[in-house]
Amino acid sequence: MTDVVGEEVVRAAYRRGQRKIVVDSQAIITPQAFDAADRLSMRLVRAEPTAAPPLSTSPGRALNRTLYRRHPGFVPTARHTNVRANPLSKVAILGAGGQGSALAGLLASTSAAERVSIIDLIPGLAESVAIDIQHASSLMSTNVRVTGSGTIAQLDGAHVVVVTPEAAGLPGRTGLLIGETAIAAEAIATHAPDAVIVFGGWPSEVFTERLRSIGNFAPERVLGTGATLATSRLINAIAAFLNVQQAEIDAIAMGIDGRYFPVLSASRVRGRPLSSLLGPTELDAVMALAANAAQHVQSLRASRPPSVAPAHAALGVISAIRGARPGPIPVSIALDGAYGIDSGVIGITAHLSAQGVRAPVELPLSDNELKELRDAAETFQGELTALAELPD
């Protein structure tokens, strides 16, 4: 009997926290189901049936094997993108270090912006990165204009400003990071007061709020990449632990730096709940692997923090801002009542737009997950107070 997948199936899966539904290759999917999946930013995946085994020397056994049909295998699909999304008019990157350089190259190669302006106070650094990228423009088949400068005034006209402090994550550099954040906030407030701001450093949440408060920016226009990067590292850790492809995994990390946790109701591997594949001890091991990812990279090159993964996290946020990545995205934003949290920058899922945060998305958390999120909010307030007591 052929299965029929209707709108009610899609909505029921959405309420369970699923973002992807795997259906039989012969199933009938109604137009209403496709419309509901599009509105809820879900994916409908058809699984191809496993081919029947070849005939053997025993005709009877061969016939039995031919008649026996195994369950459809899991076929991961690429993340849906909106090819109609327009590039941003201008993206400015404050900092031409590892992350800033990598992000500039990604923006150029994906044509995410018409203009990319790299700014760094070290003489010649931003210019050298911009020239290097321009030399590769014909290989990337892109017409993005990339410029570099040591002048803060190049922030003028930026739709999005990405702050990539080189001191982020390096031990003993908190004071330097405080100074870099203050300089960035004052520069943006002067030259790009209406821009959407993406903070690409870490600890993400507390410095995203620090940046917002110094510049007195609207909360919905200041975003941190902490939860975006934590989710990517979580997926990588799950893939390594279970020996599966990352494309076969749906997972979300929420919380704050040092206290991110997986949302089990929204975490699946090959369509199966993550909780059915990993016990509490194994899940703790996966989270430890994800949490120590940055330290592991840094242990191999002590003077330089991770750069490529943070750059891709920033690109993911920018893609959501310009509509190229539809649906909610894990991102660190200021909360105002979501999950019963009245203040603080916390990593959750949210819909983004050209103006910044369009709306937070509240997932159906378990009691333990909700407690972890609220405990993270309390920790955030303590870290913010401790940061305020440090000298500028």
Image (tube, rainbow, N blue to C red):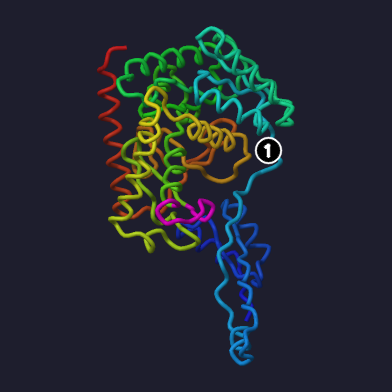
The residue lying toward the viewer, choosing from 282 and 19, is 282
Give the residue drawn at x 35%, y 44%: 289
Q: Point out residue 389 in the picture as x, y percentages from the top left corner.
A: 25, 18
Q: Is residue 343 magenta?
A: no
Locate residue 131, reporting x and y percent: 65, 17
Q: Is residue 241 magenta?
A: yes
| Image position, residue 138 (x, y; %) | 74, 27
Nearer to the camera, 86 or 39:
86
User: Camera-side residue: 46 or 278?
Assistant: 278
Residue named by callout 1: 85
Q: Is residue 281 left or right of residue 316?
A: left
Residue 224 horizontal side relative to residue 137, left or right = left
Q: Please give the name of the residue rendered at 58% of the width and 20% of the height, measured from the top-left corner.
A: 92
Which of the 4 image quadrants contains residue 160? top right
Tell me if residue 352 comes above or below residue 119 in the rendering. below
Q: Quadrant of the N terminus?
A: bottom right
If the image is split into quadrants, where does the C terminus sit? top left
Q: Left of 223 or right of it: where is 129? A: right
Q: Is residue 241 above or below residue 114?
A: below
Dividing the picture into quarters, in which one does residue 299 lie? top left
The amino acid beneath tag 1 is: Ala
Residue 236: x %, y % from top left: 45, 46
Name the element at disc 1: loop
Around disc 1, counting alpha carbons within 10 Å, would you say few (fewer than 14), some (14 to 19), or many (20 or more)?
A: some
Magenta span of residues: 239-250
Residue sitting at x 31%, y 24%: 171
In the displayed image of the protein, which residue is found farthest to the front? 57
